[in-house]
Image (spheres, rainbow, N blue to C red):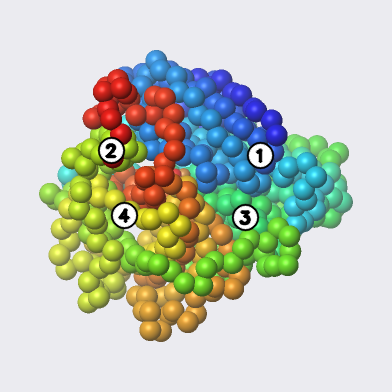
Amino acid sequence: AEVRTYDWKVAYMKWSPDCVENNVIVINGQFPGPEIRAKAGDTIVVNLSNNLKDGEGLVLHWHDGTASVSQCAINPGETFVYKFIVDKAGTYFYHGHYEMQRAAGLYGSLIVDVEDGTKEPFEYEGEINLLLSDWWHKSVHEQEKDLLASPIRWIGEPQSILINGRGQYDCSKTTKSCSLTNKQCERNALTVEPKKSIRVRIASTTSLASLNLVIQSHSMLLVEADGNYLQPKYIDNLDIQSGESYSVIINTSQNPSMNYWVSVSQRGRKPPLPPPALAILNYKPTSVTLMPSSQPPLSPAWDDLLESKNFTSMLLGLELPHPSAIHRPPDRHDRRLFLLNTQTKIDGSVKWSVNNVSLVLPKTPYLGLFKFGLTNGFDATTPSETFPPTYDIMKPPTNPNSKIGSGVYKFKHMEIVDVILQNANMLKENVSEVHPWHLHGHDFWVLGYGEGKFSEEKDEKFLNLNNPRLKNTVSVHPYGWTAIRFVADNPGVWPFHCHIEPHLHMGMGVIFAVAVDKIKQIPDGVLDCGLTAVTPLALAPAP
Ligand code: C2O
Ligand code: CU
């Protein structure tokens, strides 16, 4: 295994992701940030310096499931060293996790190949990497303010969908500086050899959009999700939520003297939506400038919810005895949380809440609060593990008022935890939205999905304990529930939150603290803020 070291400077820069000039967060002058490519077992060291201005903090989060501490933000002018081992091959990404920084462009790919001598459970001869995102012309700082305003000023739909940081906005629709000939927004050409099997890696770091990808004339064999192998399934379109990643294999067996469209559409929200993002699948040696012969292929309709539900329900983990198979979940749980997702109000402002609490993080990272026994730094009361059984999920909340909170669900080391995510109607009648829930620090098994309110009596027997897939992000569909199980084997303090950036900003998350007594070493600089912003010697660890 190797140590791979990167020196990254994070700053704002003028950039035109969709041909419209904007302030974008770049790393070393690049948008999206540099790709990290490693082999399983490698150590990644990133020396990250914050060159943002106006006191804006900085935090990165790595979606590979292992390397994330709850840390103080890195202040402007400061450098912080992230050091972690990528222990599992797969398609991942990293992104900013301070306020809504991800939506300002702070993200990039993290791809981990299997170690030498190890094989993936599928073969491929070439590779394409697609990092998908959505883009607003309004600055993220404005968006953050608008979302917390009373009354709320909702950010609306994105102006563009981006593929590898590029989209093409219709310049006639803006008065801002916009040029379709700008190289920064040039349409991606993905060049492939004919008659080969190609692995297409797809990750979504959207702020809001649920996306769907179609490749003209090519069916896709789905093989990986969030760094875990799947039972291979042929699909002709791929639904992908914010926070998810997938790999599909395509065969470049079409006419090699042509090019083909790759189209990425937003779905699941009411139009008007931005036009699909397009890239060209370019067969060698055909010129990249040759336009595909027909219109771009269409994704399922925006409101074809059944398509999304069927897709998520059919995915299964790779089964034993395949050597790469994931292991089965334990066949019992020690604890089961029921988390009701509702839209609520606090002092007249719209929030998102879980069991009627809207998350506001304390000034001091939880890790420090626990380490030093500073129980005054957050809500000491454990948040509710369930919601009233009489709650009608099909109607807007009868009492829409919730409260803010920073409470923590604590788990013992190796505790087997189930979470039933329960969706419900929003404040407005007849609307319920999809929420992609992402857990830091652990993968979980997706045991099942269902319509309406989860009932142990009728739904328990349908949970899949045999070959569920492992994920770190999962959707809860409108008016439905999703059941997951994980083993709390990674000591630390881990957010579990909706990956929709504005929803998290409005409080849609909870905090899981796993075996805090077992947290080993906390790297230097991680806790230098809030109540723990004193010389380490002055703080004695809690007994
Ligand atoms: Cu990719 Cu906490 O998020
Ligand atoms: Cu959400």
For label 2, the SS is loop
Q: Quadrant of ligand 1?
A: top left
The residue under the point 39% across, 24% down is: 525
In the structure shown, which secondary structural element does the residue marked by tag 3 occupy?
strand
Find disc 4 in the rendering and name its residue.
409
- Location of residue 357 by image quarter: bottom left
Q: Which residue is mark 2?
A: 542
Q: Amino acid at mark 4?
A: Tyr
Q: Nearer the viewer, residue 218 or 201?
A: 201
Label 4 and label 2: CA atoms lie apart by: 19 Å
Residue name at image x 73 percent, y 60 percent: 323
User: Mark 2 or mark 3, which has the lower sequence index?
Assistant: 3
Q: Amino acid at mark 2?
A: Ala
Residue 228's tag is 3
| Residue at the outermost front position | 543
Q: Is label 1 in a helix, a strand or a loop?
A: loop
Q: CA distance from mark 4 to mark 3?
A: 26 Å
Dot 1 or dot 3, earlier in sequence = 1
